[in-house]
Image (tube, rainbow, N blue to C red):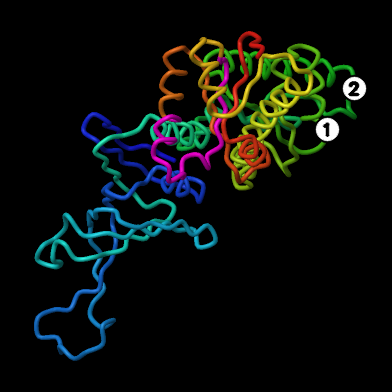
Protein backbone atom coordinates (compact mmCIF):
# COMPACT_ATOMS: atom_id res chain seq x y z
CA UNK A 1 0.00 0.00 0.00
CA UNK A 2 1.28 3.42 -0.92
CA UNK A 3 0.13 6.33 1.25
CA UNK A 4 0.02 9.50 -0.88
CA UNK A 5 -1.38 11.98 1.67
CA UNK A 6 -2.21 11.61 5.34
CA UNK A 7 -3.97 14.38 7.26
CA UNK A 8 -5.88 12.91 10.18
CA UNK A 9 -6.35 16.41 11.62
CA UNK A 10 -8.57 17.26 8.65
CA UNK A 11 -9.98 13.74 8.54
CA UNK A 12 -8.62 12.25 5.32
CA UNK A 13 -6.06 9.87 3.91
CA UNK A 14 -5.25 9.28 0.23
CA UNK A 15 -3.72 5.98 -0.80
CA UNK A 16 -3.18 3.41 -3.52
CA UNK A 17 -3.97 -0.22 -2.67
CA UNK A 18 -1.55 -2.51 -4.48
CA UNK A 19 -3.07 -5.92 -3.86
CA UNK A 20 -6.11 -7.68 -2.46
CA UNK A 21 -4.67 -7.52 1.04
CA UNK A 22 -4.58 -3.71 0.82
CA UNK A 23 -8.23 -3.67 -0.31
CA UNK A 24 -9.08 -5.85 2.66
CA UNK A 25 -7.34 -3.33 4.94
CA UNK A 26 -9.55 -0.55 3.54
CA UNK A 27 -12.59 -2.76 4.11
CA UNK A 28 -11.54 -3.21 7.73
CA UNK A 29 -11.39 0.53 8.46
CA UNK A 30 -14.54 1.65 6.60
CA UNK A 31 -17.73 2.50 8.48
CA UNK A 32 -21.14 3.75 7.35
CA UNK A 33 -21.02 7.54 7.37
CA UNK A 34 -17.45 7.73 6.05
CA UNK A 35 -16.86 9.30 2.66
CA UNK A 36 -14.96 7.66 -0.20
CA UNK A 37 -13.63 9.60 -3.19
CA UNK A 38 -12.26 7.81 -6.23
CA UNK A 39 -12.29 7.60 -10.01
CA UNK A 40 -15.26 5.60 -11.21
CA UNK A 41 -17.55 5.32 -14.23
CA UNK A 42 -21.28 5.94 -14.54
CA UNK A 43 -23.68 5.51 -17.41
CA UNK A 44 -24.90 8.94 -18.56
CA UNK A 45 -27.94 9.54 -20.71
CA UNK A 46 -27.48 12.72 -22.70
CA UNK A 47 -30.26 15.16 -23.58
CA UNK A 48 -32.26 13.88 -26.48
CA UNK A 49 -31.83 10.23 -25.54
CA UNK A 50 -35.03 8.21 -25.85
CA UNK A 51 -36.71 8.23 -22.43
CA UNK A 52 -38.08 4.76 -23.14
CA UNK A 53 -34.66 3.28 -23.82
CA UNK A 54 -33.23 0.55 -21.59
CA UNK A 55 -31.89 1.53 -18.13
CA UNK A 56 -28.45 0.28 -19.13
CA UNK A 57 -28.35 2.42 -22.24
CA UNK A 58 -26.32 5.60 -22.54
CA UNK A 59 -22.63 6.46 -22.55
CA UNK A 60 -20.40 5.25 -19.73
CA UNK A 61 -18.33 8.21 -18.57
CA UNK A 62 -15.25 8.19 -16.33
CA UNK A 63 -15.35 10.70 -13.47
CA UNK A 64 -14.24 11.37 -9.89
CA UNK A 65 -17.07 11.00 -7.37
CA UNK A 66 -17.33 11.30 -3.61
CA UNK A 67 -19.98 9.20 -1.91
CA UNK A 68 -21.36 8.97 1.62
CA UNK A 69 -20.77 5.33 2.53
CA UNK A 70 -23.84 3.26 3.39
CA UNK A 71 -22.87 -0.27 2.37
CA UNK A 72 -19.63 -1.99 1.39
CA UNK A 73 -18.56 -5.52 0.58
CA UNK A 74 -15.16 -7.09 0.02
CA UNK A 75 -14.95 -9.61 -2.81
CA UNK A 76 -11.67 -11.46 -2.34
CA UNK A 77 -12.07 -13.67 -5.39
CA UNK A 78 -13.07 -10.72 -7.54
CA UNK A 79 -10.18 -8.58 -6.34
CA UNK A 80 -12.43 -5.61 -5.67
CA UNK A 81 -14.10 -3.69 -2.88
CA UNK A 82 -17.57 -2.33 -3.72
CA UNK A 83 -18.70 0.75 -1.80
CA UNK A 84 -22.25 2.09 -2.17
CA UNK A 85 -23.75 5.38 -1.05
CA UNK A 86 -25.22 8.72 -2.08
CA UNK A 87 -23.10 11.06 -4.22
CA UNK A 88 -21.96 14.09 -2.21
CA UNK A 89 -19.53 15.59 -4.71
CA UNK A 90 -18.90 15.26 -8.44
CA UNK A 91 -19.47 16.90 -11.83
CA UNK A 92 -22.97 18.32 -11.41
CA UNK A 93 -23.39 18.77 -15.16
CA UNK A 94 -23.26 14.97 -15.47
CA UNK A 95 -24.77 13.64 -12.25
CA UNK A 96 -27.31 14.72 -9.64
CA UNK A 97 -26.04 14.98 -6.09
CA UNK A 98 -27.90 12.70 -3.69
CA UNK A 99 -28.33 9.88 -6.20
CA UNK A 100 -26.89 6.47 -5.40
CA UNK A 101 -23.67 5.15 -6.88
CA UNK A 102 -21.39 2.17 -6.29
CA UNK A 103 -17.62 2.64 -6.51
CA UNK A 104 -15.69 -0.53 -7.28
CA UNK A 105 -12.13 -0.32 -6.00
CA UNK A 106 -9.42 -2.55 -7.47
CA UNK A 107 -5.65 -2.74 -6.89
CA UNK A 108 -3.81 0.40 -8.12
CA UNK A 109 -6.95 2.58 -7.91
CA UNK A 110 -6.25 5.82 -6.05
CA UNK A 111 -8.79 6.43 -3.28
CA UNK A 112 -9.39 9.03 -0.60
CA UNK A 113 -11.12 8.08 2.66
CA UNK A 114 -12.67 10.86 4.75
CA UNK A 115 -13.86 10.36 8.33
CA UNK A 116 -15.27 12.69 10.99
CA UNK A 117 -12.92 10.88 13.39
CA UNK A 118 -10.11 8.41 12.80
CA UNK A 119 -9.96 5.78 15.54
CA UNK A 120 -6.54 4.75 16.73
CA UNK A 121 -7.20 1.17 15.67
CA UNK A 122 -8.06 2.29 12.14
CA UNK A 123 -4.82 4.27 11.91
CA UNK A 124 -2.94 1.25 13.23
CA UNK A 125 -4.39 -1.00 10.52
CA UNK A 126 -3.20 1.25 7.70
CA UNK A 127 0.19 1.87 9.33
CA UNK A 128 0.77 -1.88 9.72
CA UNK A 129 -0.22 -2.61 6.12
CA UNK A 130 1.93 0.22 4.79
CA UNK A 131 4.96 -1.01 6.71
CA UNK A 132 4.55 -4.63 5.70
CA UNK A 133 3.93 -3.84 2.02
CA UNK A 134 6.86 -1.45 1.78
CA UNK A 135 9.14 -4.42 2.41
CA UNK A 136 11.31 -2.07 4.45
CA UNK A 137 14.65 -2.26 2.63
CA UNK A 138 15.65 -5.48 0.89
CA UNK A 139 19.14 -6.01 -0.43
CA UNK A 140 19.54 -8.18 -3.52
CA UNK A 141 22.96 -9.53 -4.52
CA UNK A 142 23.42 -11.36 -7.80
CA UNK A 143 26.82 -12.93 -8.16
CA UNK A 144 28.73 -15.22 -10.50
CA UNK A 145 32.40 -15.93 -11.22
CA UNK A 146 33.21 -12.62 -12.86
CA UNK A 147 30.50 -10.16 -11.80
CA UNK A 148 28.45 -8.86 -8.90
CA UNK A 149 25.44 -6.58 -8.72
CA UNK A 150 24.18 -5.22 -5.39
CA UNK A 151 20.83 -3.41 -5.34
CA UNK A 152 18.56 -1.94 -2.68
CA UNK A 153 14.91 -2.75 -3.38
CA UNK A 154 11.91 -1.04 -1.82
CA UNK A 155 8.24 -1.20 -2.76
CA UNK A 156 8.62 1.65 -5.24
CA UNK A 157 12.25 1.81 -6.28
CA UNK A 158 15.39 -0.11 -7.19
CA UNK A 159 18.73 1.49 -6.39
CA UNK A 160 21.91 -0.07 -7.77
CA UNK A 161 24.45 0.22 -4.95
CA UNK A 162 27.36 -1.32 -6.82
CA UNK A 163 28.05 -3.25 -9.99
CA UNK A 164 31.48 -4.51 -10.96
CA UNK A 165 33.31 -7.22 -12.87
CA UNK A 166 36.65 -8.21 -11.29
CA UNK A 167 39.39 -9.89 -13.27
CA UNK A 168 39.36 -13.49 -12.07
CA UNK A 169 41.64 -16.14 -13.58
CA UNK A 170 39.79 -19.14 -15.02
CA UNK A 171 39.89 -21.90 -12.44
CA UNK A 172 41.32 -24.63 -14.65
CA UNK A 173 44.27 -22.47 -15.77
CA UNK A 174 45.68 -21.65 -12.31
CA UNK A 175 43.76 -23.00 -9.30
CA UNK A 176 45.89 -21.20 -6.69
CA UNK A 177 45.63 -17.81 -8.37
CA UNK A 178 41.90 -18.33 -9.00
CA UNK A 179 41.30 -19.07 -5.31
CA UNK A 180 43.26 -15.98 -4.26
CA UNK A 181 41.42 -13.71 -6.70
CA UNK A 182 38.02 -15.12 -5.68
CA UNK A 183 38.96 -14.38 -2.06
CA UNK A 184 39.66 -10.75 -2.96
CA UNK A 185 36.41 -10.64 -4.95
CA UNK A 186 34.38 -12.02 -2.02
CA UNK A 187 36.05 -9.56 0.37
CA UNK A 188 35.10 -6.66 -1.87
CA UNK A 189 31.46 -7.83 -2.03
CA UNK A 190 31.44 -8.32 1.75
CA UNK A 191 32.74 -4.80 2.39
CA UNK A 192 30.03 -3.26 0.21
CA UNK A 193 27.45 -5.48 1.86
CA UNK A 194 28.54 -4.44 5.38
CA UNK A 195 28.58 -0.74 4.46
CA UNK A 196 25.13 -0.96 2.88
CA UNK A 197 23.76 -2.87 5.87
CA UNK A 198 25.09 -0.20 8.22
CA UNK A 199 23.59 2.63 6.15
CA UNK A 200 20.20 1.19 5.21
CA UNK A 201 19.57 -1.66 7.70
CA UNK A 202 17.84 -3.92 5.14
CA UNK A 203 15.13 -6.20 6.45
CA UNK A 204 16.53 -9.15 4.58
CA UNK A 205 19.17 -10.05 1.98
CA UNK A 206 18.55 -12.11 -1.15
CA UNK A 207 21.60 -13.80 -2.64
CA UNK A 208 21.15 -15.18 -6.16
CA UNK A 209 23.23 -16.49 -9.01
CA UNK A 210 24.12 -19.54 -11.12
CA UNK A 211 26.51 -22.37 -10.30
CA UNK A 212 28.49 -22.72 -7.09
CA UNK A 213 29.73 -19.13 -6.75
CA UNK A 214 26.76 -17.79 -4.70
CA UNK A 215 26.83 -20.88 -2.46
CA UNK A 216 30.56 -20.42 -1.91
CA UNK A 217 30.00 -16.75 -1.08
CA UNK A 218 27.30 -17.67 1.44
CA UNK A 219 29.72 -20.06 3.13
CA UNK A 220 32.32 -17.25 3.13
CA UNK A 221 29.72 -14.88 4.62
CA UNK A 222 28.77 -17.32 7.40
CA UNK A 223 32.43 -17.51 8.37
CA UNK A 224 33.17 -13.75 8.19
CA UNK A 225 29.87 -12.19 9.31
CA UNK A 226 27.38 -14.68 10.85
CA UNK A 227 24.81 -11.93 11.66
CA UNK A 228 24.56 -10.87 8.02
CA UNK A 229 24.49 -14.49 6.92
CA UNK A 230 21.54 -15.14 9.27
CA UNK A 231 19.29 -12.78 7.33
CA UNK A 232 20.51 -13.89 3.90
CA UNK A 233 18.24 -16.03 1.73
CA UNK A 234 19.87 -17.98 -1.10
CA UNK A 235 17.88 -18.51 -4.32
CA UNK A 236 18.98 -19.81 -7.68
CA UNK A 237 18.99 -17.60 -10.77
CA UNK A 238 20.14 -18.48 -14.27
CA UNK A 239 22.59 -15.57 -14.43
CA UNK A 240 24.11 -12.75 -12.38
CA UNK A 241 24.34 -8.99 -12.90
CA UNK A 242 21.36 -6.80 -13.72
CA UNK A 243 19.77 -9.58 -15.75
CA UNK A 244 19.86 -11.80 -12.67
CA UNK A 245 18.39 -8.96 -10.60
CA UNK A 246 15.48 -8.64 -13.05
CA UNK A 247 14.95 -12.39 -12.81
CA UNK A 248 14.72 -12.23 -9.00
CA UNK A 249 12.30 -9.30 -9.13
CA UNK A 250 10.16 -10.86 -11.87
CA UNK A 251 9.51 -13.81 -9.55
CA UNK A 252 8.38 -11.35 -6.82
CA UNK A 253 10.85 -12.97 -4.42
CA UNK A 254 11.27 -9.87 -2.19
CA UNK A 255 7.50 -9.68 -1.65
CA UNK A 256 7.22 -13.42 -0.99
CA UNK A 257 10.10 -13.40 1.48
CA UNK A 258 8.78 -10.33 3.33
CA UNK A 259 5.32 -11.89 3.60
CA UNK A 260 6.78 -15.19 4.77
CA UNK A 261 8.83 -13.39 7.42
CA UNK A 262 5.75 -11.52 8.66
CA UNK A 263 3.75 -14.74 9.00
CA UNK A 264 6.69 -16.44 10.74
CA UNK A 265 6.97 -13.47 13.13
CA UNK A 266 3.29 -13.72 14.04
CA UNK A 267 3.57 -17.47 14.57
CA UNK A 268 6.57 -17.02 16.88
CA UNK A 269 4.60 -14.55 18.99
CA UNK A 270 1.60 -16.87 19.25
CA UNK A 271 3.82 -19.87 19.97
CA UNK A 272 5.29 -17.86 22.84
CA UNK A 273 1.78 -17.15 24.13
CA UNK A 274 0.88 -20.86 24.23
CA UNK A 275 4.29 -21.78 25.63
CA UNK A 276 3.84 -19.40 28.57
CA UNK A 277 0.25 -20.52 29.09
CA UNK A 278 1.40 -24.16 29.21
CA UNK A 279 4.17 -23.43 31.70
CA UNK A 280 1.90 -21.18 33.80
CA UNK A 281 4.64 -18.58 34.07
CA UNK A 282 2.15 -15.80 34.81
CA UNK A 283 3.71 -13.44 32.25
CA UNK A 284 0.98 -13.93 29.65
CA UNK A 285 -2.74 -13.23 29.62
CA UNK A 286 -5.65 -13.29 27.18
CA UNK A 287 -9.22 -12.07 26.94
CA UNK A 288 -10.26 -8.43 26.86
CA UNK A 289 -10.81 -7.87 30.58
CA UNK A 290 -7.63 -9.62 31.74
CA UNK A 291 -5.52 -7.82 29.14
CA UNK A 292 -7.10 -4.53 30.14
CA UNK A 293 -6.23 -5.21 33.79
CA UNK A 294 -2.61 -6.09 32.92
CA UNK A 295 -2.33 -2.94 30.84
CA UNK A 296 -3.45 -0.79 33.76
CA UNK A 297 -0.56 -2.30 35.77
CA UNK A 298 1.91 -1.33 33.04
CA UNK A 299 2.70 -5.01 32.50
CA UNK A 300 2.00 -5.37 28.76
CA UNK A 301 5.06 -5.71 26.55
CA UNK A 302 3.36 -6.92 23.35
CA UNK A 303 -0.37 -6.61 22.69
CA UNK A 304 -1.77 -9.09 20.16
CA UNK A 305 -5.12 -8.46 18.45
CA UNK A 306 -6.79 -10.56 15.74
CA UNK A 307 -8.13 -8.39 12.95
CA UNK A 308 -11.66 -9.82 13.21
CA UNK A 309 -12.02 -7.59 16.25
CA UNK A 310 -12.16 -4.64 13.86
CA UNK A 311 -15.35 -5.78 12.20
CA UNK A 312 -17.41 -6.38 15.33
CA UNK A 313 -20.73 -4.55 15.50
CA UNK A 314 -20.50 -4.01 19.26
CA UNK A 315 -19.30 -0.39 19.24
CA UNK A 316 -18.68 -0.43 23.01
CA UNK A 317 -16.24 -3.30 22.59
CA UNK A 318 -14.64 -1.57 19.60
CA UNK A 319 -14.09 1.50 21.76
CA UNK A 320 -12.49 -0.68 24.44
CA UNK A 321 -10.08 -2.16 21.91
CA UNK A 322 -9.22 1.31 20.58
CA UNK A 323 -8.55 2.39 24.15
CA UNK A 324 -6.24 -0.62 24.66
CA UNK A 325 -4.17 0.38 21.63
CA UNK A 326 -3.96 4.02 22.76
CA UNK A 327 -2.94 3.13 26.31
CA UNK A 328 -0.43 0.54 25.14
CA UNK A 329 1.15 3.10 22.83
CA UNK A 330 1.40 5.62 25.67
CA UNK A 331 3.16 3.00 27.79
CA UNK A 332 5.58 2.22 24.94
CA UNK A 333 4.17 -1.24 24.39
CA UNK A 334 4.10 -2.94 20.99
CA UNK A 335 0.81 -3.74 19.24
CA UNK A 336 0.64 -6.46 16.59
CA UNK A 337 -2.44 -7.05 14.43
CA UNK A 338 -2.83 -10.64 13.25
CA UNK A 339 -4.85 -11.58 10.19
CA UNK A 340 -7.41 -14.33 10.71
CA UNK A 341 -6.53 -15.39 7.16
CA UNK A 342 -3.40 -16.97 8.73
CA UNK A 343 -3.25 -19.70 11.36
CA UNK A 344 -1.82 -17.34 13.97
CA UNK A 345 -4.71 -14.89 13.70
CA UNK A 346 -7.26 -17.70 13.63
CA UNK A 347 -5.84 -19.24 16.80
CA UNK A 348 -5.71 -15.87 18.53
CA UNK A 349 -9.36 -15.31 17.60
CA UNK A 350 -10.22 -18.53 19.45
CA UNK A 351 -8.59 -17.03 22.56
CA UNK A 352 -11.01 -14.11 22.36
CA UNK A 353 -9.08 -12.07 19.83
CA UNK A 354 -6.90 -10.31 22.41
CA UNK A 355 -3.77 -11.53 24.23
CA UNK A 356 -0.65 -10.01 25.74
CA UNK A 357 2.93 -11.01 26.47
CA UNK A 358 3.86 -9.36 29.75
CA UNK A 359 6.96 -7.65 31.09
CA UNK A 360 6.56 -9.36 34.46
CA UNK A 361 4.43 -12.10 35.97
CA UNK A 362 0.96 -11.44 37.30
CA UNK A 363 -0.64 -14.25 39.31
CA UNK A 364 -4.34 -14.42 40.08
Q: Mark 1 points at which residue?
A: 212
Span shown in magenta: 300-321
- Height in image: 110 above or below 169? below
Is residue 304 in the magenta section?
yes
Neighbor class of circle 1 (other Cα within 10 Å; few <14, some 14-19, many 20+) is few
Res 10 → quadrant: top left
Image depth: mark 1 or mark 2 in front: 1
**Where is 184 relative to 50, above or below?**
above
| CB under 8 Å between discs 1 and 2 | no
Q: How crowded is mark 2: few (under 14 residues within 10 Å), some or many (20 or more)?
A: few
Q: Which labelled disc corresponds to residue 175?
A: 2
Q: Does the magenta stretch include residue 144?
A: no
Provide residue 13's location: percent of width, then percent of height: 30, 38
Q: Residue furthest front?
A: 364
Residue at position x 48%, y 32% in the image:
128
Residue 45, located in which quarter of the rendered image?
bottom left
- Rendered location of residue 231, percent (x, y): 69, 23
Amino acid sequence: MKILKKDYKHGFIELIPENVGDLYAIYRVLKPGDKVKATTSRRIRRKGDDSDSRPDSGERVKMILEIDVEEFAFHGFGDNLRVKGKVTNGPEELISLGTYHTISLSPLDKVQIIKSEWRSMEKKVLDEVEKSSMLAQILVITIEDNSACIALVTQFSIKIISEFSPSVTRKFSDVKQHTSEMGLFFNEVLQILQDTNLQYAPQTIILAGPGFTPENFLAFLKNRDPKLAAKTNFVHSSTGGRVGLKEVLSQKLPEKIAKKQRVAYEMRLLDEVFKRIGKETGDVTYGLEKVKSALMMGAVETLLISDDQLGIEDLEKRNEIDSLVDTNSEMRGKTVLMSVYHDSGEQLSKLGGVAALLRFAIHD
